[in-house]
Image (cartoon, rainbow, N blue to C red):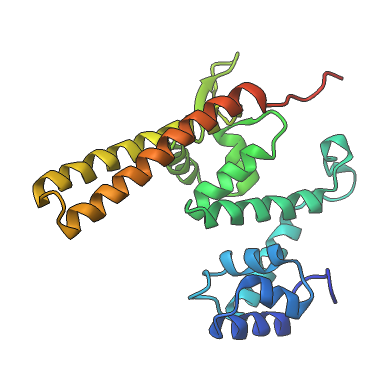
């Protein structure tokens, strides 16, 4: 039914839609589902080129079974802070993970980042991430190393000298600045090619156009990031 969990027949329709080259939004419309549901379903089960309805259905059943086994029961179940719906939070984390994957991040890095962003503290230790994501410490270490290299997380030491992994407002600014720096390197390489290939040749003109475009975008990106850093950040109210 609309809004319920995907059935095996739904997944077969998704597979047919992908085979026909339909966009996620059209598949979602035909199934009367949110586009995010279809996007998440496809991305977590191999992507648009490898999605298989039967494999996706079995994988979902296994995940549901593991989740039920792992879930605390009765009075031992820990309540969500701020009265949140635990299942809604879990579904949102999966949606956010899918969005990060679509932006180009590998799956484990996306899961770690999603976990950090949906934590009120904005920081977790390695052992906390291992417990929440049910993966090995080595997987967490590899994911954090990658995310840190992209300026998407940073490491700090808490009062107990434990290493914590943090996401905060300034990280997005740093990521935008890093992107602008990458653009600048491309501009320099393109203009070097202009000199080597000869001015006014078709190849040189193409490279010069690339350099101008990236130069303009990089400058605008840095300026916008600096302005946003100053005026757009909001902070939770003290309670």
Q: Split into 4 quadrants, where in the image is the N terminus?
A: bottom right
Q: Residue at x 35, y 39 (%)?
A: 215
Q: Split into 4 quadrants, where in the image is the C terminus?
A: top right
Q: Is residue 86 above or below residue 65?
A: above
Q: Position of residue 6 (x, y in %)?
A: 74, 74
Report the front residue among 39 and 202: 202
Q: Position of residue 222 (x, y in %)?
A: 46, 31
* Residue that protrudes farthest toward the top in the picture: 159
Q: Residue at x 28, y 38 (%)?
A: 185
Q: Residue at x 63, y 65 (%)?
A: 39
Report the front residue among 218 and 141: 218
Q: Position of residue 207 (x, y in %)?
A: 24, 51
Numbered marks: total:
0
The image quadrant of residue 11 is: bottom right
The image quadrant of residue 42 is: bottom right
- 95 relative to 34 in the view: left or right: left
The image quadrant of residue 219 is: top left
Q: Residue at x 9, y 47 (%)?
A: 196
- 214 relative to 36 in the view: left or right: left
Report the front residue among 74 and 118: 118
- 22 relative to 80 in the view: left or right: left
Residue 236 appears in the rendering: yes
* Residue that protrudes farthest toward the front in the picture: 200
Residue 173 appears in the rendering: no
Q: Position of residue 147 (x, y in %)?
A: 46, 39
Q: Is residue 224 above or below residue 158?
A: below
């Amino acid at each position: 039914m609309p809004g319920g969990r995907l059935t095996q027949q739904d997944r077969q329709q998704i597979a047919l839609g992908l085979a026909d080259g339909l966009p996620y939004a059209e598949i979602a419309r035909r199934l009367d589902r949110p586009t995010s549901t279809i996007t998440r379903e496809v991305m977590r089960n191999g992507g648009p080129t490898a999605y298989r309805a039967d494999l996706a259905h079995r994988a979902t059943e296994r995940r549901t079974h593991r989740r039920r086994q792992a879930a605390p029961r009765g009075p031992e179940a820990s309540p969500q802070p701020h009265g949140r719906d635990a299942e809604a939070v879990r579904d949102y984390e999966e949606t956010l993970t899918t969005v990060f994957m679509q932006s180009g991040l590998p799956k484990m890095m996306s899961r770690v980042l999603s976990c950090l962003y949906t934590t009120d503290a904005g920081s977790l230790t390695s052992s906390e991430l291992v417990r929440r994501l049910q993966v090995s410490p080595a997987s967490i270490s590899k994911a954090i190393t990658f995310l840190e290299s992209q300026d998407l997380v940073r490491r700090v030491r808490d009062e107990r000298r434990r290493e914590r992994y943090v996401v905060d407002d300034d990280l997005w600014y740093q990521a935008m600045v890093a992107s602008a720096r990458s653009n600048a390197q491309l501009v320099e390489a393109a203009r070097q090619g202009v000199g080597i290939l000869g001015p006014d040749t078709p190849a040189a003109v193409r490279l010069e156009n690339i350099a101008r475009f990236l130069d303009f975008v990089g400058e605008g990106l840095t300026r916008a990031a600096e302005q946003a850093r100053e005026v757009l950040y909001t902070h939770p109210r003290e309670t």
